[in-house]
Image: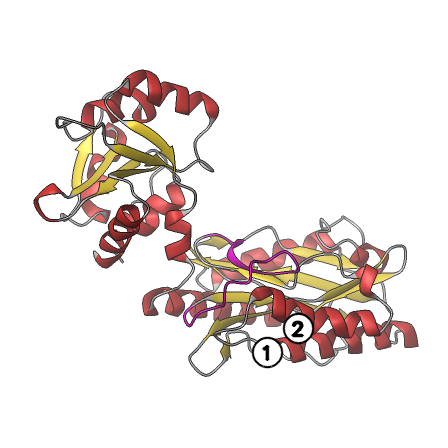
Amino acid sequence: MSPSSGRAERLAAAVHERGLDLLLVSNLVNVRWLTGFTGSNALVIIGGSGEDAARILLSDFRYTTQIEEQVPPTWDRREATQELVGPALAEHLPPAGGGTPPRVGFEDRAITVHQLERIREAIGDRAELVPAGSLVEGLREVKDAGEVSRIREAARLADIALSEVVGQGLIGRTEAQVALDLEVAMRRHGAEAISFPPIVASGTHGALPHAEPRAVPIEAGVLVTIDWGAQLEGYCSDCTRTFATGEISEDERAVYDVVLRAQETSLAAVRPGRSGREIDAVARDIITEAGHGDAFGHGLGHGVGLEIHEAPRLSRLAPETPLAEGMIVTVEPGIYLPGRFGVRIEDLVVITAMGSDVLNTLPKDLQVVG
């Protein structure tokens, strides 16, 4: 599915508002969002409007046919014979007019120092190079209906896959085996890839927020945290559930209940107009009042889209910028007690006009799995 031409026009308007004549888009995720191109070598030159509009996609011979299939003809699709970030860029820039050199922005988070020097060498005094920050990422924060649909479907098939894998039991299987089975199940149910390597962490290993699955059998009577996601047409899902494999201690049950209350309460607080910092505080206050503030060290959530971690953020360090309808974020409080256990519960939600729409369907009350 090709992206709408409206994305290019919105970006061109943002480029103009930033006081730039052109923007060089080198982040391949941003190139895909703008043009639909999924190859590994491309550069976009964009800016202006009407007769002065530049909508150029540069790639190389390997992708000529792929570009014809993926990229709408509204883009000026060009094949470069030289290094894109350097000589080819200079060759394909619109000709310079008289007077002040054009201001050309670049994605300073995506360009290396070496690449920037190559651009400067190639362009010379034909243009003024200006760091442009995250113009495309800012537009990507709000998803259109097609993006929401793909993420919703990715979440749905991920939920089906986990239900299938957990339904086979956890006790005696290794963390690594469960993670592999989950990846295979997601692909079998239609995922083109996984959003990230699944996390399966049991017992004391669950105190590591980003634990790597081990070749260690899952025991009875422990908590098991599983964090997983599917990718569909480039778009990611993300979810976490924590299970029990039998009787657990009163402390483990109490911590689970705190995390669940923090998750459900902060989830209910998600709506347009509230900042990520405000929503993070809802969950953090509950966990802190329960005596575990120091055990919740990460942010409450993050944006999800073509990347598994993108803007906006729900955290203590998030800007005061209000969230908007169409953004998709995770809500995932956790408590991690080193040497003992950990609990995390996560849902993926779309911010709507009236609040939020949860994309995950799996229950959150503590499930006991043999």
Q: Which residues are magenta?
A: 307-326
Please state the horizontal and vertical placement of residue 303, each as a whole percent of the image: 51, 60
Q: Tell me which amino acid carries mark 2.
A: Gly
Please state the horizontal and vertical placement of residue 259, each as a whole percent of the image: 75, 73
Q: 159 and 173: which one is in front?
A: 159
Q: Residue furthest bottom?
A: 354
In the picture, the quarter occupied by the N terminus is: bottom left
Residue 74 position (above or below residue 95)? below
Main SS class of the magenta portion in the image: loop
* Mark pair 1, 2: CA separation: 32 Å
Residue 199 circle label = none
Q: Quadrant of residue 175?
A: bottom right
Q: Is residue 234 visible?
A: no
Circle 2: is it few (<14), some (14-19), or many (20+) Cα within 10 Å? few
**Along the horizontal axis of the image, is 171 left or right of 38?**
right
- Give the residue pinned by disc 1: 269
Q: 43 and 192: which one is in front?
A: 43
Q: Residue furthest left?
A: 51
Q: Residue furthest front?
A: 99
Q: Is residue 343 visible?
A: yes
Looking at the image, is mark 1 or mark 2 earlier in the sequence? 2
Per the image, label 1 sits on a secondary structure element best described as loop
**Along the horizontal axis of the image, is 234 left or right of 296?**
left
Q: Quadrant of residue 40?
A: top left
Q: Is residue 315 magenta?
A: yes
The residue located at (62%, 58%) in the rendering is 181
Per the image, label 2 sits on a secondary structure element best described as loop
The residue located at (78%, 71%) in the rendering is 287
Q: Disc 1 or disc 2, which is closer to the eye?
A: 1
Circle 1: is it few (<14), some (14-19), or many (20+) Cα within 10 Å? some
- Give the residue pinned by disc 2: 167
Q: Tell me which amino acid carries mark 1.
A: Ala
